[in-house]
Image (spheres, coloured by chain):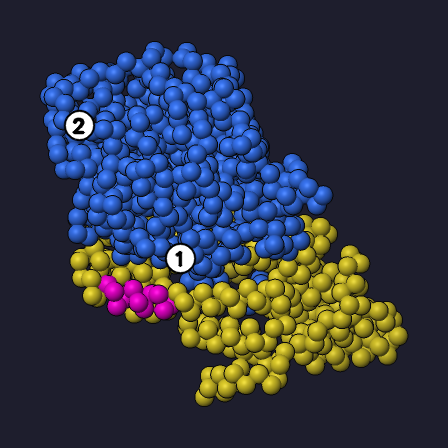
Chain colours: A blue, B yellow
């Protein structure tokens, strides 16, 4: 009987697979997790691992995407913003920078305008104060108002020991030099005043071993109001167009000249050109993935192949080889490119090699790529199903993310902030807003030698009780207590500040790397051995989505109160320190005999 | 023997009498039921009921019996014509309608039924008047809408079909075929979450529908969680423990839930019973990859590729497996095949998208048909090519391909 009405068009699984990757369908869940969703997951009943401290913190800011000013349903509105953690005044406490987004103005509301960004100084005791104007971040150079912004990156581009700030957005980026608690917009002088169409995520790292951090900037798609088609997902409701409708833009690679400026070397360095089916960049991570001590660049692209740029640079000359296809990090295990947004590198299996983690669009699995590389051959294995990640289903549109040991048990867990990209998703309990996901890294039942992620999202705490339209997340220890805190940017909803409270009786150690002459240390590897176990962390930049987190490297130690700390610097030199006491931050200065406990400016 | 014989007979009769009475009563009841059922009015009622339930064969049987007794009932004849049309017995339907016309009743309904025959038999483009009539919301309108929806589905006017299904379901919110069809459209539009909603609604109103359960389970594996999907497949497995797609669904859920041993047990049994099913063999090969055994995976994936030579996912997995085994040249050769398949599928998706946007684009239908044929979807390929020729009889590519396929 059902033949009557059922169409003749077959559901070709193979066709569906290719079609699904080329479009942005819709529909996430907003309903609370069902019994089926939390099946086999008694761990989610434990105490909260985060406390939402936003209300009393003084951080009161909302990223705006412009949909309140005009109903254009532009793809520009779908990206949202990130967060940067930056100790701008050198007081030992991470401060919070928040891009403001933008809107539309003019007679036809097609003039794209920015909204001010914010800088909150961390006063300690979970109190923050708006210092935007006094820090010189209320305007751009010459009093120019802010542009439509998305992300932020932190790096000491001039090696003066003070972290500088780069802000990305539509039409341009802005570089702010930290002049000791006050910023100056030096974009034009640094050679970054032009050449950008639409910048999303960015990251600084010394890619050519000259000590000066170079700069990678993701660009998204070639959209403007001159290229603004109408789109729908149900045949009648207008909505934001998928990236498939636009050409991808070439990404930017800027070499730091060491003289206060950058030069655009993307093309000669081997970066992929743009085009209809490539280079729609949303997230970037810089880390040494093949253990040759040269930082590599991994890029999350939306609906097209991700990039893995393996670093083949020589001093003063940037050169990359794109190896994502060959290393199996371009696509998922079915050969489909995903709608990738956020990413990170970590060591969830304690292999000593950085696994790659990518958050993807709905109807796709988030991707966990185990690192099976050798120095001559970067190579990864897709582990989303085997690792238990697949059990969360394919309901989420994932953005900001990171490996983070939320309970200090010595095993890195995973946090993902979620929220839909389109305006009117429909479907099962559907809404634009989605809950975050927290996956705990635990021993696999019945196979003690293996690890498995299990969904403990409810233990995010109060923040988890309501669905959100989240985007970028910055991960860092805002109160220097050894627990990672989160600052989460949402679209058109206030920023949330979550204090990490997991593992209250467990030990930890934090490491800050100081390379010679304030040189950039990305690519370094730090290991901590205690109780017969060895954990590894990687000096990396970028990651998450459009955000910049704590540069310090944190180790959860469980009940181990001391251990051996080892650092391998990008130049190959190694340092080892025995008997390092837990529950402190240490600054490891390259070549210095002992690590020094860092005064953290109080909590 | 005398009294003794009588006594024995009487005693036996006494024992048998109650049974005989029950049998007699039952016989009478069956006879009465049969006679009552054979009453023309009851036949008409049963025919109407079957027609509403789209049990068209039963409807036709009852209505034919009724019309044998009441040949002048033009309303019943119209219903008989509808049943015959739905059974694609267009000659019979036309004859019934002609008789209705002679009876002179309800010319609107007769015109609509003739128009529906034109669409279903001859592939005629539905006119605006019929489309407007179908929106009246009465029984005749909804009957017309069913044909229009089917036409729109078959000709890839998916948005128009969706619109029709939305209207239909406002009048018959629990209609199983309508809910299933709308879910099917959502899947074509790659909106699996809405498909899940409709499959859930279908199950809520038709809890015994195994088809809806199966589709829901499969859709939840795309847009839900494996634990949610497992509930549906478990329900089905209790009803049909030997059903292959159900067992495959269970295995897929178990694998995604890291219940590896149970997934392996299910897949091993399936692979033995269905050694030619690429999907089963691929899933089994992937399980070995999950466990870090690429050498064991290779055999399964090679068998899968033989069974489903056009499936890009299988080729991709085999290529990845060979790379893990560090057999790079072989991996590259398989990857190139997978890429070629991917390119074909990308072009197929382009054709599909073109047809979705412009369903009268004969060139797109033709291109899609050729690609379906090349990718092992013969029936669908032929259907697309025929549609291309219907839209443009001069489409040489479609004509040549159809000629070749016939040979």
Earlier residue among tags 2 and 1: 1
Residue B189, image quadrant: bottom right
The residue segment tinted magenta is B331-341
Name the residue beneath numbered marker 1. A273
Q: Quadrant of residue A349?
A: top left
Is residue B338 highlighted in magenta? yes
Q: Are marks 2 and 1 on the same chain?
A: yes
Residue B323 percent coordinates (x, y): 22, 58
What is the C-alpha distance between the residues marked 2 and 1?
38 Å
Proximity of marks 2 and 1: CB atoms separated by less than 8 Å: no
Q: Determine which residue is flagged by label 2.
A: A590
Mark 1 is surrounded, within 10 Å at the Cα level, by few (under 14), some (14 to 19) or many (20 or more) other residues, namely some
> Which of the numbered marks, if any, corresponds to residue A104?
none
Q: In this view of the protein, can residue A290 be seen by the observer?
A: yes
Nearest the eye: A270 or B240: A270
B372 in the magenta segment = no
Q: Chain of mark 1?
A: A
The chain carrying label 2 is A
């Amino acid at each position: 009987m059902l033949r009557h009405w059922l169409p003749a068009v077959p559901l070709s699984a193979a066709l569906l697979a290719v079609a699904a990757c080329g479009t942005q369908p819709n529909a996430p869940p907003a309903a609370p997790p069902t019994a089926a969703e939390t099946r086999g997951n008694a761990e989610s009943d434990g105490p909260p691992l985060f406390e939402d401290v936003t209300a009393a913190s003084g951080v009161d800011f909302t990223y705006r995407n412009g949909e309140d000013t005009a109903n254009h349903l532009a793809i520009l509105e779908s990206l949202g913003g990130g967060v940067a953690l930056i100790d701008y005044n050198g007081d030992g406490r991470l401060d919070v920078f928040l891009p403001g987004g933008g809107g539309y103005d003019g007679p036809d509301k097609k003039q794209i305008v920015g909204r001010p960004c914010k800088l909150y100084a961390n006063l300690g005791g979970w109190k923050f104060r708006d210092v935007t104007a006094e820090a010189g971040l209320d305007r751009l150079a010459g009093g120019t108002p802010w542009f439509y912004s998305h992300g932020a990156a932190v790096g000491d581009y001039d090696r003066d020991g003070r972290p500088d700030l780069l802000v990305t957005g539509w039409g341009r980026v802005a570089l702010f030099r930290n002049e000791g608690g006050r910023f100056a917009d030096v974009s034009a002088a640094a050679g970054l005043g032009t050449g950008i169409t639409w910048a999303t995520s960015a990251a600084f790292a010394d890619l050519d071993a000259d000590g000066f951090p170079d700069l990678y900037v993701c660009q998204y798609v070639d959209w403007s109001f001159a290229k603004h088609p109408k789109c729908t997902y149900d045949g009648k409701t207008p909505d934001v167009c998928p990236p498939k409708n636009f050409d991808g833009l070439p990404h930017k690679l800027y070499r730091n000249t060491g003289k206060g400026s950058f030069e655009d070397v993307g093309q000669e360095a081997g970066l992929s050109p743009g085009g209809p089916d490539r280079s729609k960049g949303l997230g970037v991570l810089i880390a040494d993935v093949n253990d040759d001590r040269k930082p590599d660049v991994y890029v999350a692209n939306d609906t097209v192949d991700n990039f893995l740029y393996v670093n083949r640079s020589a001093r003063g000359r940037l050169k990359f080889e794109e190896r994502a296809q060959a290393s199996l990090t371009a696509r998922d295990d079915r050969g489909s490119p995903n709608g990738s947004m956020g990413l990170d590198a970590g060591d969830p299996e304690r292999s000593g090699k950085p696994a790659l983690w990518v958050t993807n669009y709905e109807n796709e699995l988030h991707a966990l790529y185990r690192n099976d590389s050798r120095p001559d051959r970067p190579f990864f294995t897709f582990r989303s199903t085997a690792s238990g990640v697949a059990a969360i289903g394919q309901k989420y549109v994932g953005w900001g993310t990171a490996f983070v040991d939320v309970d200090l048990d010595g095993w890195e867990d995973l946090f993902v902030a979620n929220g839909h990209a389109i305006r009117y998703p429909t479907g099962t309990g559907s809404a634009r807003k989605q809950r975050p996901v927290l996956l705990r890294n635990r021993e696999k039942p019945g196979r003690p030698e293996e690890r498995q992620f299990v969904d403990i999202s409810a233990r995010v705490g109060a923040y988890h009780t309501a669905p959100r339209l989240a985007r970028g997340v910055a991960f860092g220890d805002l109160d220097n207590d050894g627990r990672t805190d989160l600052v989460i940017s949402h679209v058109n909803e206030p920023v949330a500040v979550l204090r990490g409270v997991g593992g209250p009786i467990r030990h930890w150690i934090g490491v800050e790397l100081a390379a010679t002459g304030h040189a950039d240390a990305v690519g370094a590897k730090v290991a901590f051995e205690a109780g017969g176990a060895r954990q590894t962390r990687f000096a990396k930049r970028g990651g998450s989505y459009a955000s910049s987190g704590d540069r310090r490297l944190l180790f959860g130690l469980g009940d181990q109160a001391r251990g051996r700390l080892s650092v391998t610097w990008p130049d190959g030199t190694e340092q080892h320190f025995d008997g390092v006491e837990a529950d402190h931050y240490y600054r490891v200065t390259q070549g210095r005999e002992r690590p020094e406990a860092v005064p953290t400016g109080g909590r | 023997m005398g009294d003794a014989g009588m006594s024995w007979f009487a005693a036996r009769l006494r024992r048998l009498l109650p049974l005989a009475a029950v049998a007699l009563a039952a016989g009478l009841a069956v006879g009465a039921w049969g006679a009552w059922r054979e009453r023309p009015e009851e036949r008409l009622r049963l025919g109407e009921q079957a027609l509403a339930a789209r049990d068209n064969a039963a409807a036709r049987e009852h209505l034919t019996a009724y019309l044998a007794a009441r040949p002048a009932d033009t309303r019943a004849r119209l219903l008989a014509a509808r049943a015959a049309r739905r059974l694609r017995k267009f000659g019979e339907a036309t004859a019934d309608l002609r008789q209705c016309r002679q009876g002179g009743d309800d010319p609107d309904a007769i015109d609509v039924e003739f128009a529906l025959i034109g669409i279903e038999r001859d592939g005629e483009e539905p006119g605006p008047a019929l489309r407007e009539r179908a929106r009246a919301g009465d029984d005749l309108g909804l009957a017309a809408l069913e044909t229009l929806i089917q036409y729109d589905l078959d000709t890839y006017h998916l948005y128009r079909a969706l619109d029709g299904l939305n209207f239909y379901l406002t009048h018959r919110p629990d209609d199983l075929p309508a809910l299933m069809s709308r879910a099917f459209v959502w899947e074509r539009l790659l909106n699996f979450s809405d498909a899940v909603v409709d499959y859930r609604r279908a199950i809520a109103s038709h809890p015994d529908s195994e088809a809806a359960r199966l589709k829901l389970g499969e859709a939840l594996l795309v847009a839900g969680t494996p634990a949610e999907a497992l509930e549906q497949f478990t329900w089905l497995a209790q009803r049909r423990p030997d059903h292959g797609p159900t067992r495959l669904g269970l295995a897929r859920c178990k694998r995604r839930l890291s219940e590896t041993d149970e997934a392996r047990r299910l897949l091993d049994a399936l692979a033995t019973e269905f050694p030619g099913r690429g999907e089963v063999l691929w899933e089994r090969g992937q399980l070995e990859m999950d466990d870090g055994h690429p050498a064991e995976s290779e055999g399964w994936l090679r068998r899968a590729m033989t069974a489903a030579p056009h499936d890009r996912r299988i080729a991709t997995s085999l290529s990845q497996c060979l790379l893990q085994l560090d057999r790079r040249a072989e991996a590259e050769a398989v990857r190139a095949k997978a890429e070629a398949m991917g390119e074909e599928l990308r072009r197929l998706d382009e054709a599909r998208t073109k047809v979705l946007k412009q369903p009268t684009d004969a060139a797109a239908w033709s291109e899609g048909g050729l690609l379906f044929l090349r990718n092992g979807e013969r029936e669908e390929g032929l259907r697309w090519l025929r549609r291309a020729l219907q839209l443009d009889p001069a489409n040489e590519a479609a004509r040549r391909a159809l000629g070749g396929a016939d040979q």
